[in-house]
Every structure is written in C-alpha cells, then in structure tokens.
Image (cartoon, rainbow, N blue to C red):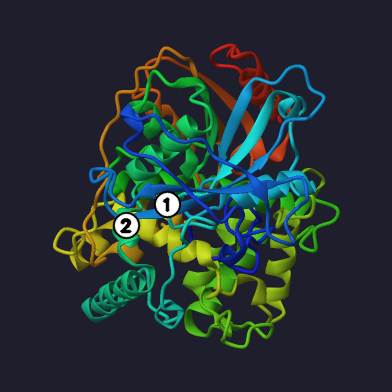
Amino acid sequence: MAPTTRLSVVASLLSSTIAFPLSSRHPSSSNSTTLPSNCTAPSITFGACPEGAPSQLECATYSVPIIWDEPEGTKFDLGLVRLPANANSTKKIGSLFINPGGPGGAASDFIGSLVLGVLPLPDGLTDSFDLIGLDPRGVGLSNPVQCDQEIWAERVSWFPKTQAEYDTLVDKNKRYGESCRNQTGPLLEYLDTISVAKDHEAVRIALGNEPLNMVGISYGSQLGAQYAQLFPDNIRTLVLDGMLQHSQSVASNVLIESLGYSIGLQHFFKWASEEETSPLKGEDVAEICAGLLTNASTTPIPAPSCDGTTCRTDVNAEELLFNAQAALVFKDPRITGGLSTWGDLASAIYNATKGDASAFSTRFDDASTAASTAIYCLDLNHDPSVYDFNYIQAKQHMFDTFQPLSQGAGQSTSLLHSCIGWPFATRNPPKKLDVNTKTTILSVNSDADPSTAYPWAIGMLEEIRNKVFITRHGDGHTSFPIGGETAAAIAQYLITGEAPDNGLVLNS
C-alpha cells in the first residue's frame, strides 16, 4: 500500500484497530510442520489472547520454516486469531480464512474489527465458520518486519525529475532494505506471496485438514489465486474480492491503477460538490484540488498537527496526490462505522485550503508500511538497470498523456518506486497463472474501485478456468468489508458453496 496517512483506513487495508503484543501471545508453546504438500501436521492449540484484545477472540502460534524448500531449517512463529463459530450453532461448516490485503495488512486486526463492529459482518457467517485471521509472515503477530524509520522518513521524490533525484531515491531504497534485513533477520528475504500461500496450507492442515474456505481481499486476492494455483484440490470456497493481476507488466499495472484512481477522484469531486454534509458543497472541487496541487508544488502546505516525529510537518503536491487515495476506499460512514471516508476527505481538502494539510501528512510510525514494501519487493522485478531514470521519465510521460488527473499516483507506483534498488532478490516474479480448480472460484470487483481497478479483474478471468465473476456497481475499494448486497452474495456462496449467476451486477 501507499504510505500511511492520517486519513488511513482501519484494519483491512492500512492500519490497525486492535493490537496484540508479540511478547504476550498465547499459548507460548508453538507447533511445527514440514512441507504442507506432504505432511501430517500437529494440531493448533488456541488460548487466551493478550490483554486488550476482544474477549471473543482466541490466539495461537504455529511454527513454520523460513524457507519452505528447507523444511528442517530455521523456523519462526506465525500468529493467528480465531473467532469461534456460535457455540449453539448446528450449521457449522469449518474454518474461514480472511486476508485483508495490503500487502502488510494484519488479518488478526481485520477479525478484531469485525468483532468490534468497526466493519460489518455478513449474516450467517459466524453460525457456519470459525473465522481465522492468520497474519502473513512479516506482518502483525507473525514476526513483523522492523526497519529504520529514520531512513523511511527521508523525503525523496517518487517522481524524480533528474538523474540526481533518481539516484537519491535508489540509494534510500537500498539503505532502507538493508536496515530491514538487519532488524528483521533472514525472514525478510522470504516474505513472498508463494511462501505465504504455503504457510496458509500448513495452517489449514493443522486446523484439521478440511478443505479451505477463504476470502482474499485486495492483495489477498493475489494470495488466494496463488494458493489455488499451488493447491487446486484443497479448496471448498474461495472469494477473490478486489482483484490484482500479478502477471501484468509494470507499465500496465501502474497505468491501470492510475485509471481506477482517476475514476474514483472524478466520482468524489461530483459527490463533494453535491452532498449536503460536505464542506465543499457548491464548489468546483476539481478546480480546488488542482489549485492545492499547484500551490503545494512550490510551497508545501503546513501540517500543524505533526511534529516531525511520527508524521511530516508539511505536505507537498506529490504527497497530497498519493495520500488522498486512501480516503477513497470507504464512501459511506453508515456502513464503515466512522472509518476514513469521502466526508473525511472533503474535510481534509477544505482544511488544506485554509493552510492545514495535517490529514494528508505521511506517517513514519505505521508497521504495515515496512511490511508492505518488503513483501512487494519480493514479488516484483526491481532491477535499477531495467527501471532506470530513462524508464521513469518515459513512464511519467505516459501518465501525463493518458492519466493527467491522477498523474500516475497510486499504490503500484509508490511501491514500485520504493523497490527500485531493493537489495534482495525477487522470489515471486510476475507470471501468468493457470488456475484449474474443481471448485468454482468467486471473483468480485467494483467497477469504480480506486485501488484495484476493474481491468485487473477482467484480466484475471483469463487466468482462472472455473470461476464466476460478479460486479458491484459503485464506489469504494472491495466489497466484502463494506456490507450490502455484494457482501451478502459472498456470504451466501461461502455458506452454501453455490456461486451466484455469472455476470451478476449488484448496486451495493
């Protein structure tokens, strides 16, 4: 994901709603397994969670190898939480894994958000499933990535205009990656999505070897698709919600996401100028934002709520453009329980016109940023001899020509530009999948998603043989976390195993 801002969404995408101190996870003893494709794994024992976690949750650890090709090598603990199915239910099916995306999003936090009512829980799921939040390696409860945040806080341009600016960016990325390796250990080099998929298979086996039920949200859709490629016969239901297409070229990826961001901005501008509760009602919001970007490109806007320790004291035009994307994720506060929404974005823009851009300030203290970068860089080709300054310039000309509104800003661009010069080898390079499952996979996308743009979902239809694709006609990122008809259709599929009609379009 893009760097965390004060507008960041909670739980599923950018930040946490609950915290589980690693030092107090329970139970303290961990279980182990060998390669998940041919093992009989010990079961997982759940116990009480650390103080401060919702009382309904149970916690556990499970030991797996850092390198799956060396199953007897060094191991580390995965952390996971469980929300048990309703005790009096007679309809229980098994376990349901939910991955909220990111990369770098903690599944444990997402399950906590469902328990606390921060995000809506579709009807019937807790009668049918134990909800499992398995934090991916390097995230949350699973040996989280640690890096030098002082290096991260160095201001560099993701749109370098000179060779010197490009060299500064690459040097920062290299030093930051080295700091992550020094503070995290050898696991940092094995955070790729294939390793994470194998971790999920190991835990599935340890939970009773029942067929997998899973919802993969945003980046979690890539995890789900790669799991299905590896273990096609081990799935009961699989939902890919807000789809990534890992096989695209870098140029295609950044252009496609930039398109989604532009559509989201256009819809937001109209909403903010017409919505009664918007402080920008009656205004030309696109013109206001263009003016802010012009002014901030020469003189950054102050962020008086930031003191430079946890977030930057001012905001330049590039940061405004990148960091606004996060607030397009949720549109309706009645659904999201008060998370950062379009109304918050309208207020943030209004405040910025008055000289306070604190809501757009880049934060330095969010653990998901370090994990996101480290994971993405292992799933991406990032050789600076390929993605050199001339490439960056050509790509920027492409944005200026085809996406002048978003100008190429977006998570794909920020992550790519954070990985150029990353000092560790790619382990899961982009590659077209051929997913061939007996189970029908349910693929879902909003046609106005500002982050996982609709063309990615269409592209993934070419890589999954047995699938049903449904569309949510509406704004915001993904569908399962926001409730509505689409979330209900997802839940019905998970419970019954029967997919909805292919091509179904829903309005919420």
Which circle, 1 or 2, is nearer the viewer? 2
Q: Nearer the viewer, residue 448 or 142?
A: 142
Q: Nearer the viewer, residue 100 or 281?
A: 100
Which residue occupies 62% across, 18% down? 493
Give x and y (percent) for residue 374: 37, 60
Labels 1 & 2 near each other (Cβ < 8 A)? no
The image quadrant that residue 448 belongs to is: top right
Q: Is residue 24 visible?
A: yes
Tag 1: Cα neighbours inside 10 Å, few (<14), some, or many (≥20)?
some
Which residue occupies 29% across, 73% down? 178
Q: Is residue 382 left or right of residue 357?
A: left
Sequence-wise, the earlier of marks 1 and 2 is: 2
Above or below 306: residue 78: above
Tag 2: Cα neighbours inside 10 Å, few (<14), some, or many (≥20)?
many
Give x and y (percent) for residue 458: 43, 28
Residue 201's label in the rendered image is none
Above or below 3: residue 277: above
Q: Is residue 404 visible?
A: no
Type of the residue with mark 1: Gln
Mark 1 — residue?
403
Q: Nearer the viewer, residue 76 or 484?
A: 76
Type of the residue with mark 2: Cys
Q: Secondary structure at mark 1?
A: loop
- Indicate the quadrant containing the C terminus: top left, top right, bottom left or bottom right: top right
Mark 2 — residue?
377
Above or below 360: residue 314: below
Q: Secondary structure at mark 2?
A: helix
